[in-house]
Image (cartoon, rainbow, N blue to C red):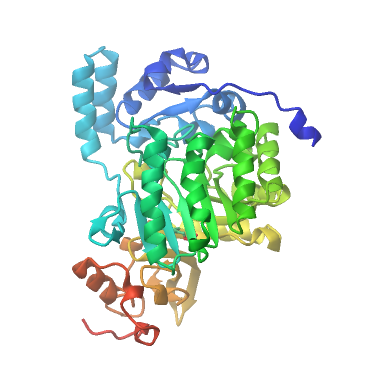
Amino acid sequence: MTAEAKITGRKYKAYTRKDIDRIPELQALPPNEMLSVKAVSAVLPFRVNRYVIEELIRWEDVPDDPIYQLTFPQRGMLDRKDLSRMMELVWSNSPAKELNAAARQIQTGLNPHPAGQMEFNVPRLGQEPLQGMQHKYRETVLFFPSQGQTCHAYCTYCFRWPQFVGMDELKFASRETEKLVDYLKQHREVTSVLFTGGDPLIMKTAVLRRYLEPLLSPELDHLVSIRLGTKATAYWPYRFLTDPDADDLLRLFEEVQQAGKHLAVMSHYSHPRELRTPAAHAAARRILASGAAIRCQAPLIRHVNDDPDVWADMWRSQVQLGAVPYYMFVERDTGPKNYFEVPLADAAEIFRTAYKRVSGLARTVRGPSMSATPGKVVVDGVSEIYGQRVFVLRFLQGRDPDWVGRPFFAQYDPEATWLDDLRPAFGQKQFFFERVLRQIKRNGDTQTWRKRAPSQQRLKIFGDAD
Ligand SMILES: *Cc1c(COP(=O)(O)O)cnc(C)c1O
């Protein structure tokens, strides 16, 4: 294809905290901006690359530019006291030891692992807990390959980034996959494995292959799809184009399809600009030509994409490329939350306004959806029932599969930003799922679907005692 032929390769060059002085574009900004970037990046991770700097950020709009907000640490991410403390330490050239101690103290006060992710979702093989896996919803296992725990650039609102492990990559990959395969053999209810991270496409193709190929075994014929959650299509499209192992990656995608599985690249696109560059187009075209699908998801983030025009534009651009809009997420509390958060009422309105403006082909998207402790809960909208204003909510995924698809209602609250802030409407004491959720928490047994026959999975929606 001609558009593809025109892409010239780029060598990947990342900047982290220690390189901040070497980013020429930053030098042109007021000195205070550089100082705050340094101060915040001592606390929260920072990584950006030349492609993002040159082709995605519009420097004349900085600091308001959405991609700058998405990738460069912002002063609003720390509370005022912490920010001035860090800025002072940086400004006075304090020793690294002192700076790091202050940063550590601030980090400890943040909340990097929300929604019971750590306690409840780790599956077991026999008695052995399987680190690096989560099995929260019956049909889907999340897998965090240890070699995929970083990204081509970091999003400011995310810092679930474990350290890179310096082990023999290939050997480690095989050992981890062996456990995953054993687990899947015993869990024939699982039809989808989602590789996530970090970003699994940070891995060299040879390493990724070690993870994927064992999943193609005929013994795992219940496995329908393999998904790769990635930001590479937005932050580093050359991963699919001109990197030394790009061709091999596409070949691997083909092999997955030839083995009878569906491969879905779950692309994290936060802003339409990420879809506009020639490299982004060419990358999407190549992925689709391999037979893989691209499904698109992103959280709704203040300062980045809290605007219905941005979403409508993004969904249209995705459809135009042949990609499928999939989820709009509500940003969850991972620390610098207040800076990025959007109230649920506003999120629902942004979603609806954007959704109204696109054709049915883009309305495959669901949202705004919260990945909360009981499950993925979508705000279907705001309604008025017998004079009471309510949020209409629904599980897209539930810790108990039987929760899915039951509309339920919460009192309207313009300030609520998360499921925990909501109260049941119509005088109910609790939401229909809360009793079972408490049981799950008490027993520490999350896989409700393995215990109960389908006939027992029925719950009374209203009027649960307890
Ligand atoms: C979103 C999510 C999945 C995948 O859900 P789908 O509805 O199949 O896309 C799986 N596990 C967890 C923990 C999730 O948050």
Q: Quadrant of the N terminus?
A: top right
Q: Which percent across, then down, holds residue 460?
A: 34, 86
Left or right of 133, for residue 378: right
Q: Is residue 351 visible?
A: yes
State the image quarter where residue 98 is shown.
top left
Q: Which percent across, then down, holds residue 356?
A: 65, 61
**Residue at the spot x=46%, y=45% of the render?**
211
Left or right of 213, for residue 442: left
**Residue at the spot x=68%, y=51% of the render?**
291
Give 167 or 441, whichever is nearer the viewer.
167
**Residue at the spot x=48%, y=35% of the render?**
202
Give 240 or 296, whichever is nearer the viewer.
240
Q: Quadrant of the C terminus?
A: bottom left
Left or right of 381, for residue 103: left
In the depicted structure, whether residue 388 falls above or below residue 147: below
Q: Ligand 1 sits in which quadrant? A: bottom left
In the depicted structure, whether residue 385 falls above or below residue 102: below
Q: Which percent across, then down, holds residue 348?
A: 50, 60
Q: How many marks?
A: 0
In the current view of this chain or complex, which residue is farthest to the right?
2
Q: Is residue 301 visible?
A: no
State the image quarter where residue 249 is shown.
top right
